[in-house]
Image: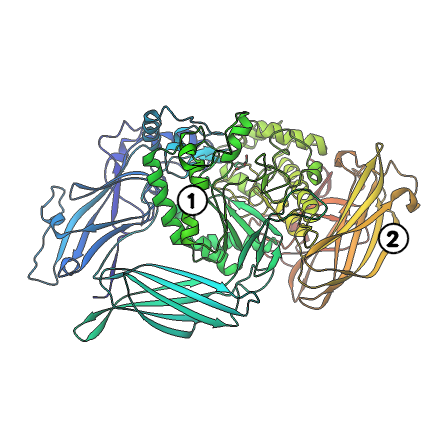
Amino acid sequence: MLRKVIDLSSDWRYRSALDSPGSPATATSIWRACRSLPTEIHLDLLNDKLIPDPFVGKNEEALQWVGEMKWEYETSLSIPIEAFQSDARAVLVMEGLDTFATVTLNEKTILESANAFIAHRLELTRAMFDTADDNGFQSSSNSDDAASVVTGSLRIVFDNAERRGLEIKEQHPEHDWFTFGSGTTRLATRKPQYHYGWDWGPKLMTCGPWKPIYLEYFTSRIADVAISSSLSTDLQDAVVTVSVEVDGPAEQVAVDLLLHGNVIHHEVTTVREKVGLVQIKVAGPELWWPHNLGPATMYSIRVFLSTAQANDLLHVDQLEKSFGIRKIELVQRKLEDQDGTSFFFKVNNIPVFAAGSCWIPADSFVSRISQRRYEEWIQLARDCNQNMIRVWGGGVYESPAFYDACDQQGMLVWQDFMFACGNFPAHPEFRAQIAVEAEQNVRRLRHHPSIVLWCGNNEDYVIYPLRRIQYDATETSPEAILKSIFPARYFYEHALPNICADLTPDTPYWPGSPFGGDMVNSQLEGDIHQWHVWHLDMFPYQDYPRLSGRFVSEFGMQSLPCLETTMEFFPADATSATLENNVLENTFLNWHNKMPDGHDRICHYGRANISFGASSLAEVIYNTQLIQAETVATAYRSWRRLWQGPRKEYCGGALVWQLNDCWPVTSWAIADYYLRPKMAYWAMKRECAAVTGGLSRIVKDGAERTLEYWAANMTQTGVTVDITIRAWLVTTGERILERKLHNRMSLAPNRSIDLGSLAIDDMNLPRTQQHRDIAFALSLDFQDSSNDTPKSVQAINFHEPLREVPFPSDKTKVDLRISQSAMGISVQAKAAVPIKGLLIEVDGDSTAKWDDNGIDLMPGQVAELRYLGQSLRPGQEDRLRARWLGGYLDQSSDLRASL
Ligand code: BMA
């Protein structure tokens, strides 16, 4: 018999359980049809209009009762009798239940589950269906009639996760329950930790069948397929090993290897001890590359399983899986001229500077994230010149669509195990849970070439240092660790690396993010979360150059989401009056910033750097996004500078906290919940382009004395550049300097190069206001090898903090024109004086997209911003709005002073 699958995604109903504590909405206690699976309770309630949108206003607060209730989901099963006949086996597959779930079949409990991250396979027997239930589901069967079915009632009851977590916690008073926030019961519960609320996320304790449920029946099946590929040193030959695990009697496995849809190899083997093993030599393999290095070529295999029947072979199961051929190394070795060790990735022998971001679940309700949305998020990151995404440990092991998108788009993935910001317990039941969870998820994801690192946890190693409590890191035996105050080291240093070594030996493992060095979060070894800016000491972001690390896996700055997104969460009856005076005191804006003193910190950085007005929503949004953009630009500019070639990889990567949001909120995200880029997004895109320049003012004895300058060439070939320095007076727009610094200078590949420094006093600049009124620009002119066209990139440098720059407030005029060419629609911008952070928007076009925005603009130059939306047409200049530091322009009403 060929394995058959019965889809169980429809015809479910739900209600609050009868023994659930009182609900404000008794309406929930009657059965209602639910959405198709996968689903979560809030989505069903929302669908039936039993709750308001949890993302709007302060609805979250009024919806806490949902998480306190017990919820039931029920469906009727109808299974062909052949599923139980002769040697067939029927298995109910539930890929994920969130979280404390009791599953009954015809009122008999068949599963008690307490881990949202694991899948269940439950064998069903004919005997389970032999009694009729009293819910109207008649269990009928007739074994004489092959067409008949057995029917039954399948019910899943989801319990209150917080209460259950509390019970577990109380059973373990010996453990030091401690977190950085969101309560401590979360530590006892294998549920997405961000459901408990985070400093960017609402507390929405949802539950439900959040992953697919189906029934399969078979005589034999393919239980798992492991694919690994090893490459020769010169990458010219690969051996692909396909190991097929079989469940049930089977004779033969046939494997097709496919490339670009064509079968390029066929191999047949005999199943021995439940495994069919095939090794395929691939000469001249097409490698999988991150998108900035080459094509992300995917191969796939098709596996066919057969059993012997009479003298024949009977095809019983088949499966297709895609994979990539690539080699990954995490390089930690001594550096030249500096202490410590490197931390960077090599892909197919090429060292890669990882420029990327941290990923949180893209919704509070993960089950509604479509494949398309995952693809759009990864595309957005890729368009921003990112090549790595870190799946953060407080969310979920993502769905296949996420990793498929990363595979296909050439995005490297740093994958945390799901532990974050807490001292997790390690009692025996918890250990048993983690063993299953880790094994299942590694097996599920290991064929994705995009995953280049498995990492034990997020920030669990910094708990004790931050509390100034010593744990004995030299005590490394499992027994000693389990008895210590930090027992979860057992997972990070023993259980998880062992599972990874066993199941995915070619992908590196790292105990935690951050980890490494004598003091975890060292600047000299391992990876670092750089939170001295924003959190901890609230250092200025201008300090980033001295705050680097060997690999910065978190850093960031909060800003408000885009205007249209903000408007989405204001309740319909909120009037504009609610926004008068200090916008940041607005009750809804406050609710949508989950860091208790978030707005204070925003104001701190705002006031330290610009004239931080907060009297209109648009102005606050612009100002906070500008500060975030400056922060992110400073980080990438200064840390990419430290990628200096072989043995000088002083910084091997930087991942901004964070790429995305799970609801509309003020956060560190560089694009908001609706995928609208904030200004930091474009800043990152510019700073992480293949070829960039850098400029920095060096202050000595209280005065700006020199300009250091450098260039980065992240391509794999040399680039020949002309380098010019220019300067303008900010007050008048007069150009006061233009000097060619290098003619046809060759930039070596894959590194940054310090080019020297210039004494400002030797530049013969007119008498200026201590250089505060000068804007410098370093331009690099070269031939773009990708399309053989001339290209120019510019690094612009203003005095900092920006509030000390004497930008003219009234005379500024920015001229905007719409033009159309074969490339599409563009907006051309010109200005008479140097402009900081020019952001162009289209009135009434909330879906506008741009290839660049939020730019700095120098007099005499024309910036061309490509419009990638649908609605703007030539001649519609009156729809353009622009905002820059200190100015605002509405083409229809002419220049207005900054609001
Ligand atoms: C980091 C993360 C998150 C948190 C973020 C912002 O360290 O690991 O826990 O949301 O900081 O505070």
Question: Can I make out residue 392 in this image?
Answer: yes
Which numbered mark, 2 or 1, is in the foreground of this view? 1
In the rendered view, tell whether residue 861 sits above or below residue 283. above
- Residue that protrudes farthest toward the left in the picture: 144
Residue 496 shows which numbered tag? Answer: 1
Image quarter in which the N terminus is found: bottom left
Which of these two is toward me, 417 or 244?
244
Which residue in the protein does label 2 denote? 738
In the rendered view, tell whether residue 667 sits above or below residue 708. above
At a point 72% along the width and 40% down the height, the residue shown is 885
Helix, strand or loop status at disc 2: strand
Q: Where is residue 164 in the image (x, y as percent from the top left)?
A: 32, 30
Question: Can I make out residue 730 in this image?
Answer: no
Q: In this view, does 822 lie to the left or right of 103?
A: right
Q: Which of marks 2 and 1 is nearer the N terminus?
A: 1
Helix, strand or loop status at disc 1: helix
| Res 149 → quadrant | bottom left
- Cβ atoms under marks 2 and 1 closer than 8 Å: no
